[in-house]
Amino acid sequence: DELRAVARLRLAAVLIDEKTPDAALKMLEAEAPAAFAAQFALSKGDALVAAGKSAEAKTAYETALQKAASKTGPFVDSVQMRIDALGH
């Protein structure tokens, strides 16, 4: 399951880069293992930003913060930067 989760995250990132955020969102719909929940929420937020859905992206990023294993560090800082960039 963990290997599949990593593969889905990587494929979603490629799909976002290729300007196909809807395909990335489909990839991220499946249940993520608990250890990857924050990363899946972050990737979902990135896909939603790419799709022009900033309000939904903010919600996804907030979920990523809630599910983060640590409440400090580079991951949390990165998510918070994304939220701040949305300006909501």
Image (cartoon, helix red, strand yellow):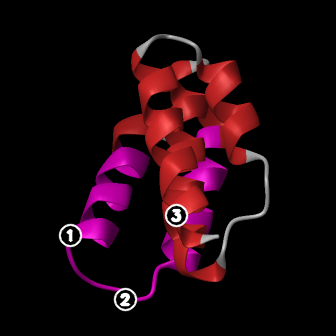
Please tell me whether mark 2 sits on a helix, a strand or a loop.
Answer: loop
Mark 2 or mark 3, earlier in chain:
3
Against 88, residue 70 (above or below) is below
Please tell me whether mark 1 sits on a helix, a strand or a loop.
Answer: helix
- Tell me, yes or no, whether the two marked residues, 2 and 3, touch with CB atoms within 8 Å: no
Q: Amino acid at mark 2?
A: Ser
Please tell me whether mark 3 sits on a helix, a strand or a loop.
Answer: helix
Q: Residue at x 52, y 64 (%)?
A: 3
Residue 40: say if magenta.
no
Residue 44 in the image: state x and y as whole percent.
60, 44
Residue 72 in the image: state x and y as whole percent.
27, 84
The quadrant in which residue 31 appears is bottom right
Residue 24 in the image: state x and y as whole percent.
62, 30
Task: State which region is magenta.
Answer: 57-84
Q: Residue at x 54, y 80 (%)?
A: 35
Mark 1, residue position: 74
* CA separation in Å, label 2 and label 3: 22 Å
Viewer-side residue, 85 vs 14: 14
Q: Residue at x 47, y 79 (%)?
A: 68
Mark 2, residue position: 70
Mark 3, residue position: 3
**Left or right: where does residue 23 sit relative to residue 50?**
right
